[in-house]
């Protein structure tokens, strides 16, 4: 019997890892947000498609509600139950559910909350266009993310800025 090609990954064999230190929530946010995940794009050699398997513990979300202005995302629930917030609407989700969050504004802002008693495990798939602008409707923040290089795991190749519109400076300030 021949060995499986490296492009085949079995979800049951993945080692889900906590998020990197730089992205761990602090303060009150640490009580609401938690996730373990396995990034699969680099493992499978994909460069223009990002995907990961994530597990969120009961009562938590992986991320605040957010809308991608550039990249589309697709989610497939592998196990557990939760609530998908998309725009202003909330929808129950369970194993086998698939839902899309296309790039857009507040109407496509999305968040998954684990409402069950076991981990909510899902596959997240997205385009990986850079730069990306992400808006966070609940807090009024935005993020600008750009990758300079081919290795997304090399954090030194990222430009990342989180801010609020009201903190913007004039184009000519300091010139």
Image: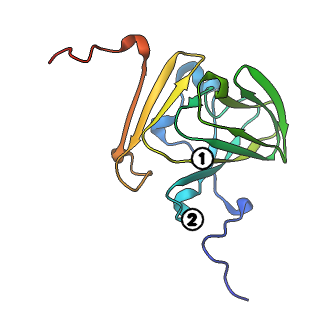
CA separation in Å, label 1 and label 2? 15 Å
Could you tell me which secondary element the residue under label 1 belongs to? Answer: strand
Q: Residue at x 72, y 59 (%)?
A: 11
Q: Residues within 10 Å of mark 1 (few under 14, many from 20)?
A: some
- Residue 163: x and y in percent read 42, 20
| Location of the N terminus (image quadrant) | bottom right
Q: Residue at x 39, y 51 (%)?
A: 154
Could you tell me which secondary element the residue under label 2 belongs to? Answer: helix
What is the number of the mark on residue 126?
1
Task: Indicate the colouring scheme.
Answer: rainbow
| Location of the C terminus (image quadrant) | top left
Q: Answer whether residue 33 is visible to the viewer in this image.
A: yes
- Residue 106: x and y in percent read 62, 22
Residue 48 in the image: above or below residue 56: below
Q: Residue at x 35, y 53 (%)?
A: 149
Reading the image, the residue beneath label 2 is 44
Q: Residue at x 64, y 57 (%)?
A: 15
> Which of the 4 image quarters holds residue 32?
top right
Residue 9 in the image: above or below residue 127: below
Q: Residues within 10 Å of mark 2 (few under 14, many from 20)?
A: few
Furthest residue to the bottom? 1
- Residue 68 vs residue 64, the one in the foreground: 68
- The disc, 1 or 2, on the residue closer to the chain's N-terminal end is 2
């Amino acid at each position: 019997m021949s060995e499986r090609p490296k492009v085949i990954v079995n979800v049951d064999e993945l080692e889900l890892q906590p998020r990197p230190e730089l992205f761990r929530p602090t303060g009150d946010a640490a009580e609401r947000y938690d996730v373990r995940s396995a990034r699969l794009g680099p493992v499978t050699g994909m460069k223009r498609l990002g995907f990961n398997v994530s597990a969120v513990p009961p009562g938590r979300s992986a991320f605040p509600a957010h809308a991608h202005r550039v990249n589309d995302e697709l989610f497939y629930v592998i196990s557990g139950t939760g609530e998908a917030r998309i725009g202003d609407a909330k929808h129950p989700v369970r194993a086998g559910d698939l839902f899309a969050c296309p790039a857009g504004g507040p109407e496509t802002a999305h968040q998954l909350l684990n409402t069950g008693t076991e981990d909510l495990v899902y596959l997240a798939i997205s385009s990986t266009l850079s730069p990306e602008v992400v808006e966070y409707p609940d807090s009024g923040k935005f993020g600008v993310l750009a990758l300079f290089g081919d290795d997304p795991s090399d954090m030194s190749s990222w430009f990342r800025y989180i801010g609020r519109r009201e903190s913007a400076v004039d184009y000519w300030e300091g010139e």
